[in-house]
Amino acid sequence: MTEFEGRLDAAGLRVSIIAARFNDAIVTHLVRGAVGRLRQLGARPEDVEVIWVPGAFEVPAAAEAAIAGGRADAIVCLGAVIRGATPHFDVIVDEVARGIGRIAARGEVGIGLGVLTCDTVEQAIERAGGKAGNKGSEAAEVAVEMRRLLTLLGET
C-alpha cells in the first residue's frame, strides 16, 4: 500500500490570504491567526500577502485573480457570514462555498476555507480565536498541507 500526505511546511510557498472586510472585527482575528500560523510553519513575511475584498461573496473572484496572476502557491480564504433575518445568508454562503470549492477542485493551488458561517456574532467570535480556536489558523494549515500534497501527487 502507498500513502500520500502533505507536510505542514510553508517555507518557500507564496501564500495569498483573501479576507472579507465585512465583519472585519472578526475577520481581522482570522487573518492574524492565519499569518501567525504561516510564520510558525516557516513562511517568510515577504511571501505572505493579504488581499482585502468587500465581503465574502467576493472572495472566490479574488482567489481566481490571484491564481491567474501567478501570485500564490496556496490561498487562504477568510470571512465571516452571520445569519440575519432574511435568506441573504443562505445565498451568500452557498455561492461562496461553491466558488471556493470549484477553485479547490481544479488542484492548481492549495486552498484553505476559513469563511465562518455562524448563526450569531458570539459563535463567530468563538471561532476567531475564542473557545473554538482560530479557524484562520486552521485554514492556513489546510492550504499549506494541500499545496504540499498536490505537489507530491504531481511528482508521482
Image (cartoon, rainbow, N blue to C red):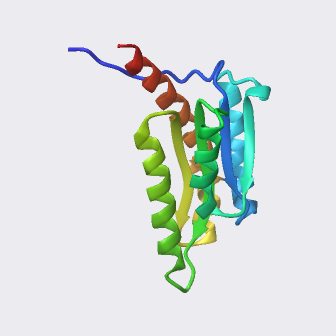
Q: Where does the N terminus fall, quadrant-wise?
A: top left
Q: Is residue 57 left or right of residue 20?
A: left
Q: In front: 15, or 137?
A: 15
Q: Is residue 92 above or below residue 105?
A: below
Q: In front: 134, or 93?
A: 93
Q: In front: 138, or 57?
A: 57
Q: Is residue 111 left or right of residue 51?
A: left
Q: Position of residue 118 (x, y in %)?
A: 53, 67
Q: Position of residue 37 (x, y in %)?
A: 66, 33
Q: Which residue corresponds to the image point at 55% horizontal and 41% vertical from the top-left?
A: 138
Q: Where does the C terminus fall, quadrant-wise?
A: top left
Q: Residue furthest left?
A: 1
Q: Position of residue 112 (x, y in %)?
A: 53, 42
Q: Which residue corresponds to the image point at 59% horizontal and 29% vertical from the top-left?
A: 73
Inspect this view and state whether residue 126 appears.
yes
Q: Position of residue 26 (x, y in %)?
A: 70, 59
Q: Residue furthest front?
A: 68
Q: In front: 100, or 113?
A: 100
Q: Is residue 23 above or below residue 152?
A: below
Q: Which residue corresponds to the image point at 72% horizontal and 63% vertical from the top-left?
A: 54
Q: Which residue corresponds to the image point at 59% horizontal and 66% vertical from the top-left?
A: 81
Q: Quadrant of residue 20?
A: bottom right
Inspect this view and state whether residue 130 appears.
no
